[in-house]
Amino acid sequence: MDIGWISVVVPFTSGYEPVWVGLGTVVFDLLIAVTATSVLRHSVPDQWWARIHSVSYVLWSAVAVHGSALGTGSGWALRAVSIACLVAGIGAVIFRPPSRQPDETLRHRIGEQPWR
C-alpha cells in the first residue's frame, strides 16, 4: 500500500486507514523527538529531556495498537511482534520504578562523562 511520504510525517493525511496510519505517524514523529533528544542529551535541559523520554512508555502501547490494527499480509507474525512489543513495554513499566538511582551525585557524575 502506497501512503505517500507526506502521510509518514503529517498525521491523519493518508487516504488509506487514516486513523491507524495517523497513529503510526504520531508514534514515528515522537520516536524522532526521543531519538533527537538522546543525540542532543547534553544540549537539552534535563526537565525537557525527561518529559520527552517519558513519552516512550506511551509509544509501546501505541505501536502495539497500530501494528494490530493494520496487520494484514502475515497476520499472525505481525500480531506476535505487536504482542511482544506490548509485553516488553509492560515489563519496562514494571521494572523502571524500582531501578531508579536515588543518588543524585552519582547520576550527575555519570551525566558529565563524555559519550563515545
Image (cartoon, grey):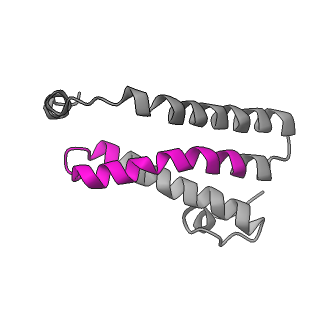
From the viewer's perspective, tell me whether residue 51 is left or right of residue 75.
Answer: left
Decide whether the magenta segment is chiefly helix, strand or loop.
helix
Query: Could you say which is closer to the camera, residue 95 or residue 43?
Result: 95
* Residue 14 image-quadrant placement: bottom right
Instruction: Say whether residue 74 is visible.
Output: no
The count of marks equals 0
The residue nearer to you, when weighing 110 against 77, is 110
At a point 80% along the width and 33% down the height, the residue shown is 77
Q: In the picture, which quadrant includes the N terminus?
A: bottom right
Q: Position of residue 59 (x, y in %)?
A: 55, 48
Examine the structure image and report whether residue 109 is included in the region drawn in magenta. Answer: no
Q: Position of residue 57 (x, y in %)?
A: 51, 45
Q: Is residue 20 left or right of residue 51?
A: right
Residue 63 position, x and y percent, is 64, 47
State the image coordinates of residue 36 (x, y, percent, origin top left): 36, 49
In the image, residue 21 sits, relative to residue 111, either above or below, namely below
Tell me the residue at 69%/61% (across/down): 21
Residue drawn at point x = 34 percent, y = 31 percent: 100
Looking at the image, residue 113 lies above or below residue 35 = above
The answer to whether any part of residue 106 appears in the image is yes
- Near-viewer residue (112 or 10): 112
| Residue at x 44% of width, y 32% of height | 96
Q: Which residues are magenta?
A: 37-65
Note whether 22 is above or below 98 in the view shown. below
